[in-house]
Amino acid sequence: MSTDKEDTSTFPALGRALLWVDNKRNVERIVYGLYIICALLFAADFVYQKKVYLPVEKIPGFYAFYGFFMCAALVICAKAMRVILKRPEDYYAPDDVETEDYPEEQLDRIDHNG
């Protein structure tokens, strides 16, 4: 979080333009604004007549519920896939270049004692 003492003149233009997001109160305003927009769009689904292709599309708020449940399903599936796909930290270690010893003649060691 930026402080009053920090020199923002060295920030790039986009960084200076987005400094208002650094304030927690402004972030809360954005979140509440998104809640209001979602609620208004959900309420608008009850007002207008839709041209539907499938009978399930006639249900008011269907796409809001469908989107919410599919997003939740993606998160749950990702957590389940993590259990299956997760590898130990040293999984690539036997073949990793960084596990090889560096050639002694290329180290250019400096003797500081003497």
Image (cartoon, helix red, strand yellow):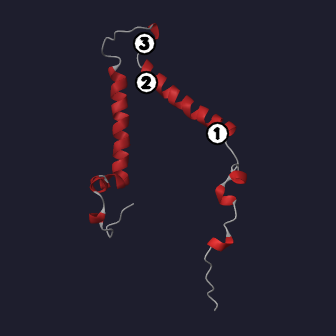
Q: Which residue is mark 1?
A: 82
In this view, the residue farthest toward the front is 105
Q: Quadrant of residue 113?
A: bottom right
Residue 47 point in image, percent of width and height = 31, 16
Badge 2 marks a residue whose secondary structure is: helix
Residue 90 visible, this orientation: no
Side of 11 where 91 appears, left or right? right
Residue 54 at what x, y percent from top left?
Answer: 44, 8
Name the N-terminal-most of marks 1 and 3: 3
In the rendered image, the vertical position of residue 79 relative to residue 66, given as above or below: below
Please, what secondary structure does the residue beneath circle 1 have?
A: helix
Q: Amino acid at mark 3?
A: Glu
Instruction: Give the residue drawn at x 59%, y 35%.
Output: 78
> Is disc 2 surrounded by few (<14), some (14 to 19) or many (20+) residues within 10 Å?
some
- Residue under pointer 3: 57
Distance of mark 1 from mark 2, alpha carbons? 27 Å
Q: Is residue 108 left or right of residue 46?
A: right
Q: Which residue is at the front of the view, 18 or 92? A: 92
Q: Is residue 1 above or below residue 73?
A: below
Task: Please tell me which of labels 1 and 2 falls first in the chain.
Answer: 2
Give the amino acid at mark 1: Arg
Q: Residue at x 29, y 58 (%)?
A: 12
82 vs 105, nearest the viewer: 105
Disc 2: which residue: 64
Q: Position of residue 18 (x, y in %)?
A: 31, 52
Q: Residue 96 or 60: which is nearer the viewer? A: 96
Q: Residue 109, can we see it?
A: yes
